[in-house]
Image: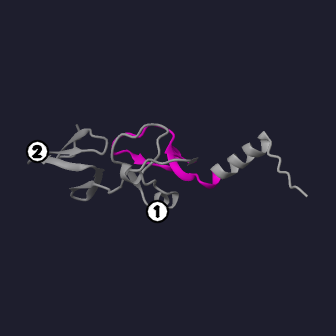
Amino acid sequence: MKLKLDFNGKTILLLLFFSSALFSYDVLTTLKDIKFKEKITQENLVLKQVNTLSKNCTPLSLEEFKNGTYTASHYIFKDSILCSNDVVKYEKESVVFDFGSLQIEHEGKIIYENDHYIRIKKQDGTIEKIYKNGKIE
């Protein structure tokens, strides 16, 4: 008694499809371009499966992303895989102004201060000048 195995084209395609799903990686990819030092939100990302990864890319997992807030360490193009070296943990930098009974908190970093005003560099790179009497320029 001979056992005859008949593999037609449909069977081979079906086997290839299932085997490719076994060896694929779940990665986060970007839906739009992400600027330098921009906060990365879940609306900007989508979960995809890819078959191959670059050697120098360790993909950021969904659990890691949900556990922290991240900013881009460089400009990230649309539809690119989000690697762990592409992002850094977000650290809030803020300046608190005390005008007696009124306190104002601004996001940014002090780059210059004198007796009349303070210059603050915001997260997006713009520089704001705030006078000691409360006037913003």
Membership of 26 in magenta stretch: yes
Nearer to me, 117 or 70: 70
**Sequence-first tag of 1 and 2:** 1
- The reply to whether dot 1 and dot 2 touch (C-beta < 8 Å) is no
Place of residue 46 in the rendered image (x, y in percent of width and height, measured from the top left): 55, 46
Q: Is residue 40 magenta?
A: yes
The image quarter containing residue 68 is bottom left
Mark 2, secondary structure of its residue? loop
Q: Where does residue 8 sit, x and y in percent of width and height?
A: 80, 42
User: Three-letter amino acid code at disc 2?
Assistant: His
Q: Position of residue 51 (x, y in %)?
A: 56, 47
Residue at 19 percent across and 50 percent down: it is: 110
* Point 23% across, 50% down: residue: 109
Is 135 drawn above or below residue 97 in the view shown?
A: above
Q: Residue furthest left?
A: 115
Q: What's the coloring here?
A: one colour
Residue matched to label 2: 116
- For label 1, the residue is 67
**Disc 1 from disc 2: Cα separation:** 42 Å
**Closer to the observer: label 1 or label 2?**
1
- What's drawn in magenta, residue-wise? 21-48
Counting other residues with Cα less than 10 Å from the Cα at mark 2, is it few (<14), some (14-19), or many (20 or more)? few
Q: Residues within 10 Å of mark 1 (few under 14, many from 20)?
A: few
Tell me which amino acid carries mark 1. Answer: Asn
**Against 65, is 9 above or below?**
above
Q: Quadrant of the C terminus?
A: top left
Q: Nearer the viewer, residue 52 or 123?
A: 52
Give the residue drawn at x 63%, y 49%.
Answer: 20
Residue at 18% x, 46% y is: 133
Q: Secondary structure at mark 1?
A: helix
Quadrant (top left/top right/bottom left/bottom right) for the N terminus? bottom right
